[in-house]
């Protein structure tokens, strides 16, 4: 089945998909004049804000099968095009009862007057039609065509899912240092891919993700969990340190325990991306006094430490 697949982690919130969708469903199909039409053409894809400012999600109709909206429509205004596996709305048969919106699990239906509706000013259900006219011409849906970051891609569903799985596996293997953990309140299991530590760990980490229970040297030195949704990592020991370095900014906390010029342990909450660096320093017993407070500072300071510890020499690059 060919469809538009959403990669939400790639969306940058540029809204190009919304504009392309509205223009595609205008009478003129010309972005320079479409906004002057009456009624104004409406978008069928909706880019919503994510949990933080740099994330967004392009929400669109999933064309469910069976489709709850089709099942509850009292006038038969919602139908399915079996040839393209699309759920469609016939505006002239819609009475605007909003039963479809009530049962839609993805909140993708809106109500507006449309050019081919039952009458001027009459609001009817508006939703993604998969750009069916473009598909009949052998073209790509407008939203996927204009997306420059592949947040919206068009193709065979199984192939797109397989490609996403391959990207995820590659990211985990590239991370190398992987800690599996669970939220102790919800029981939800998750994986922290933290930092490159040793290439030899990658196959073991991948096997564990597939259900194995393998161990590698040093794995017992790191404990990872979530407390009320906040990632927490504890590394090594906190017993009898010579010095304790601590930094807190908002909800992010980094505490490093030193003894004899080496890292013996660390605790992180919130932003845990430096955990792999601390663990590497601890296992290697590298002298760290020369780093000073850079040990707990984010940004280029930690990057210099990482590259130095890995034998590449200091290098300013914000990676953690």
Image: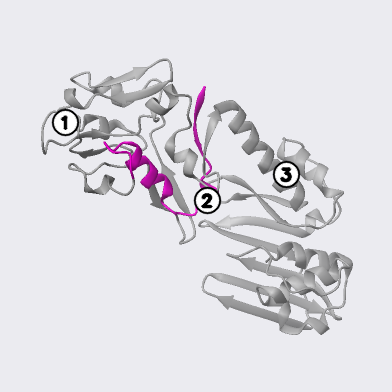
Q: Which residue is mark 2?
A: 185
Left or right: where does residue 274 sit relative to residue 79? right
Are discs 3 and 1 less than 8 Å apart at CB? Answer: no
> If you read the primary sequence from the N terminus, does the residue marked by circle 1 or circle 2 appear first?
1
Report the colour scheme: one colour
Range of magenta residues: 1-30
x, y percentage for residue 237? 77, 68
Please tell me whether mark 2 sits on a helix, a strand or a loop.
loop
| Above or below, comparing residue 292 to residue 168 in the picture | below
> If you read the primary sequence from the N terminus, does the residue marked by circle 3 or circle 1 appear first?
1
Are discs 1 and 2 less than 8 Å apart at CB? Answer: no
Badge nearest the viewer, 1 or 2? 1
Are discs 2 and 3 less than 8 Å apart at CB? Answer: no
Disc sitting over residue 97 in the figure:
1
Q: Quadrant of residue 269?
A: bottom right
Local crowd size for mark 3, using a 10 Å CA cut-off: few (<14), some (14–19), many (≥20): few
Give the quarter of the figure containing the C terminus.
Answer: bottom right
Magenta-drawn stretch contains 250: no
Local crowd size for mark 2, using a 10 Å CA cut-off: few (<14), some (14–19), many (≥20): few
Instruction: Residue at 62%, 38% (x, y): give it.
Output: 164
Is residue 168 something that shows in the picture? Answer: yes
Please tell me whether mark 1 sits on a helix, a strand or a loop.
loop
The residue positioned farthest toward the top in the image shown = 82
Q: Quadrant of residue 264?
A: bottom right
Q: In this figure, what is the number of numbered marks?
A: 3
């Amino acid at each position: 089945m060919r469809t538009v697949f959403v990669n939400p982690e790639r969306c940058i919130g540029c809204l190009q998909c919304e504009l392309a969708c509205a223009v595609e469903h205008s009478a003129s199909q010309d972005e320079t004049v479409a906004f002057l039409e009456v009624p104004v053409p409406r978008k069928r894809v909706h880019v919503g804000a994510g949990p933080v400012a740099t994330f967004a999600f392009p929400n669109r109709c999933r064309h469910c099968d069976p489709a709850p909206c089709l099942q509850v429509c009292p006038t038969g205004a919602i139908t399915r095009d079996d040839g393209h596996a699309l759920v469609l709305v016939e505006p002239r048969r819609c009475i605007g009862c909003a039963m479809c919106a009530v049962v839609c699990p993805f909140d993708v239906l809106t109500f507006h007057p449309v050019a081919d509706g039952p009458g001027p000013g009459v609001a009817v259900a508006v939703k993604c039609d998969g750009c069916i006219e473009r598909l009949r011409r052998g073209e790509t849906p407008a939203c996927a065509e204009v997306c420059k970051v592949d947040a919206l891609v068009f193709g065979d569903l199984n192939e797109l899912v397989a490609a996403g799985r391959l990207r995820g596996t590659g990211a985990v293997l590239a991370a190398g240092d992987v800690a599996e953990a669970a939220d102790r309140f919800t029981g939800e299991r998750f994986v922290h891919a933290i930092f490159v530590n040793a290439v030899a760990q990658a196959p073991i980490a991948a096997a564990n993700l597939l259900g194995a229970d393998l161990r590698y040297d040093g794995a017992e030195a790191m404990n990872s969990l979530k407390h009320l949704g906040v990632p927490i990592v504890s590394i090594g020991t906190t017993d009898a340190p010579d010095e304790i370095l601590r930094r807190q900014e908002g909800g992010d906390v980094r505490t490093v325990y030193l003894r004899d010029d080496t890292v013996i342990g660390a605790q992180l909450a919130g932003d845990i991306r430096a955990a792999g660096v601390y663990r590497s320093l601890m296992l290697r017993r590298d002298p760290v006094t020369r780093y000073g407070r850079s040990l707990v500072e984010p940004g280029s300071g930690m990057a210099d430490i990482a590259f130095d510890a890995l034998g590449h020499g200091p290098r300013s690059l914000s990676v953690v």
